[in-house]
Image: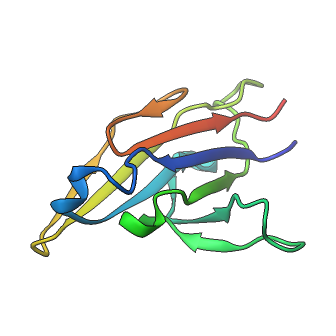
Amino acid sequence: MRPLFFEVRCNLSQESPLWNDIHSLSLEVGYPGRGGQMLWKRIGWLNDQLLPAGKGIAHAVWNQASTSLILIFDFLPVMLQDSAVLDKTYRIRKKIKTAAGRSHVSNSGILQGEYRDEHFTLSPQYPE
């Protein structure tokens, strides 16, 4: 079975006034592994058509200069316990580092489907 992919985009433009108070945004995507343990990723594949053959990887950190960065996180598919149904639940851990040097971390509850807030859009692509 093919992997499960999450595409992550920053929703802030380079001109957004929110960057006056934000130094950087980072994101971790969590997906349940076998046995129910949450697997967290903070490094993804760069989604860039201009790269030469192969894949580039990057930390999931955005700042004012890198708002166009699109990352792809991949996870092995996991079936719901005692079922042939794909587990489509995941979580997000978001960290905002302020211009003053403070950090704010927020964790989402269990999510299914596309996620969107003022900082990020996350689109899952489930295997067939």
Residue 113 can be seen, yes or no = yes
Q: Quadrant of the C terminus?
A: top right
* Residue 52 in which image quadrant: bottom right
Please tell me which residue lies in front, 59 or 37: 59
**Residue 63 in sight from this viewpoint:** no
Q: Is residue 52 left or right of residue 8?
A: right
Q: Quadrant of residue 118?
A: top left
Count the labels in the image. Answer: 0
Q: Residue at x 58, y 36 (%)?
A: 123
In the rendering, at what x and y percent does residue 6 appear?
Answer: 62, 45
Q: Relative to the observer, which residue lies in front, 84 or 29?
A: 29
Describe residue 128's horizontal placement relative to residue 118 as left or right: right
The residue positioned 86% from the left and 72% from the top of the image is 54
Image-based side of 68 in relation to 64, left or right: right
Residue 108 in the image: x percent, y percent?
Answer: 33, 40
Q: Which residue is at a point 69% across and 45% down the rendered structure image? A: 5
| Residue at x 55%, y 60% (from the top left corner) | 69
Q: Is residue 84 above or below residue 43?
A: above
The location of residue 2, given as percent across then percent down, is 85, 44
